[in-house]
Amino acid sequence: MSLIVVGSVAYDGVETPHGKVDRMLGGAATYIALAAAYFTPVKLVAVVGDDFAQEDYELLASRKIDLEGLERIPGGKSFFWAGKYSDDMNDRTTLRTDLNVFADFNPKLPASYRPAPYLLLGNIQPSLQRGVRAQMNGVKLAGGDTMNYWINDFRPELLQTIREWDFLLINDSEARLLSGEHNLRRAAAKILDMGPHTLVIKRGEYGAILFRRNGHFMAPGYLLEDVFDPTGAGDCFAGGFIGYLAGRGVEASDGEIDIVELRRAVIYGSVMGSFCCEKFGVDRFRTLTREEIEARYQEFQTCTSF
Amino acid sequence: MSLIVVGSVAYDGVETPHGKVDRMLGGAATYIALAAAYFTPVKLVAVVGDDFAQEDYELLASRKIDLEGLERIPGGKSFFWAGKYSDDMNDRTTLRTDLNVFADFNPKLPASYRPAPYLLLGNIQPSLQRGVRAQMNGVKLAGGDTMNYWINDFRPELLQTIREWDFLLINDSEARLLSGEHNLRRAAAKILDMGPHTLVIKRGEYGAILFRRNGHFMAPGYLLEDVFDPTGAGDCFAGGFIGYLAGRGVEASDGEIDIVELRRAVIYGSVMGSFCCEKFGVDRFRTLTREEIEARYQEFQTCTSF
């Protein structure tokens, strides 16, 4: 069950209390695709410059990620972001953002992508997200991410965009900003009135909450002994969540959906987010196996059942 | 299965975004006792002045809380604390602390209290906590709370005290301070080396984690729609936790204990802490029924199982 992933493929410079890497593969779509690819075939839509390294291309290709939609701009440079984390890694400061070729990103789906049933829209301009959705035919489940910048400065476009989504995956501060409510339960109720029948609020180390009109599900965060680099953890959560649902062929009809599968998807999201933090950048995914994923899923069960 | 509760019985002045009360019944031991009394018979050890109101005495007595150990100092004034919460209620500022009769609190157990099998020591000077433990004979399960002041300035006494405890119930910042480790999994491992075989780390709205040498259990926080006053929520957690264990007659032998009952105790702790926040001070406990407690426990199960 093919999943289309749209968003940034980039290079990151990251400093955490555990070390510093000046330039490594990053970007939301990279993390989403790598995480989702453990569960389902992924087709990537992104743009890079001709500085995009062959080894990074090969890493994605080795996961059977379809790269027909990875546009390469001759003479262009890939999106570059650099940031530094605080000592407890709960805050980060952006040191540099060079949009480069990403500034003109206008995602176009190859013909072979259009009939795909699953769509995950990474955090990009809301009308671009909407344009991607419009290029597809036969979507069974679509949703995505956004951020404070779009919520504040592109609110009408954003509202128009998410009205067509099945699910929205955002963090707690974004949920508060979007709804104007501090309390998450009230915030969720307002957001579910904006269109999506499913809302996942990510709370970093504290886990995530899945909201539906008739109830919610709370997943704790996995208790890691060492967090090396939290970059991309939220995107890996998204990748695990939608990847699992796509792999299982879960679909929504009139907003109705298998709630047990949705809950499992949240746990797989948490699992993938937790692995992401164990090494710098995407390094953990160079060795991670499906067996390790299943073992951690079982650990979640053991650590939460009563 | 009688439970001894030792700590402060006080008057509080509290201001939250939802209102302001100049003077109402408060104190850690009050909250612990009221919460625990839903599950097991409670015997209170505390000190008040002769300003302690008859109606407050009657509230405690109406819950069958044994008040033989509630010392009343003629001419003395009860402990008074006043605080104001921030808009999101995640921070609070202490406006006033008048220790009054609590400054000379030296808990002495009535003879009828000494054979009680369960002991919960609220946050008081560690050597006083130790003195209470020494007055008891036949304790099956003992533990308690502490705070940053004792951890920083009375560390040797505190370490000597908790060495004799079965469980320690503290919040995340106290666990970090006590262990010198930021990561909670590492912090817990160090604290479990200090004596207690069971550690519960409270994380406020994010729930709680139960740590044992061979594993841990994570409980999310109950998602309240309105938090009126978080004062006492951590103490009500403690009361629900130990109250449930006492009511079920759970005991530890060589550190071995029924892990399923421990997990349930953590959920009952979360349930009692959540109810506490729904009204000002102890008001929620004036009407709360055991049926409402069971219903919320079931809600926890529904919201967390997958």
Image (cartoon, coloured by chain):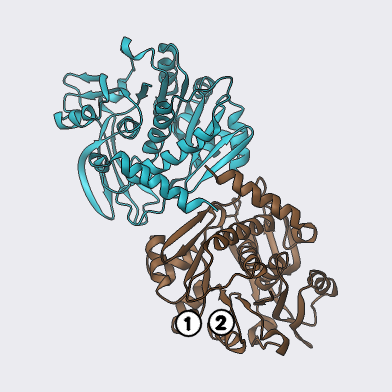
Chain colours: A cyan, B brown
Residue A5, x across and y down, in percent: 35, 25
Alpha carbon separation for disc pair 2 and 1:
8 Å
Label 1 marks a residue whose chain is: B
Q: Is residue B22 left or right of residue A129?
A: right
Q: Quadrant of the N terminus of chain B?
A: bottom right
Q: Residue at x 67, y 73 (%)?
A: B29
Q: Is residue B82 left or right of residue B161?
A: right
For label 1, the residue is B154
Query: Does residue B254 appear to the left or right of B273 in the view shown?
Result: left
**Subunit under mark 2:** B
For the point 38% across and 47% down, the residue is A296
Residue B77 visible in this rendered orientation of the protein: yes
Residue type highlighted by circle 1: Phe
Residue, disc 2: B125
Q: Residue at x 40, y 38 (%)?
A: A237
Spot occupied by residue A11 in the image (x, y as percentages of width and height): 24, 35
Classify residue A131 by image quadrant: top left
Mark 2 and mark 1 residues within 8 Å of each other at the beta carbon: yes
- Residue A221 visible within the image: no
Residue at 64% from the left image edge and 88% from the top image edge = B106
Instruction: Determine whether A70 is above or below B233 in the image.
Output: above
**Badges 2 and 1, same chain:** yes
Quadrant housing residue B113: bottom right
Q: Earlier in the sequence, mark 2 or mark 1?
A: 2
Q: Mark 1: give few (<14), some (14-19) or many (20+) Cα within 10 Å.
A: some
Q: Give, as a three-letter code, the residue at label 2.
A: Gln
On screen, residue B114 above or below A210? below
At mark 2, the secondary structure is: loop
Q: Residue A76: x and y, percent?
A: 19, 23
Circle 1 — which element? loop
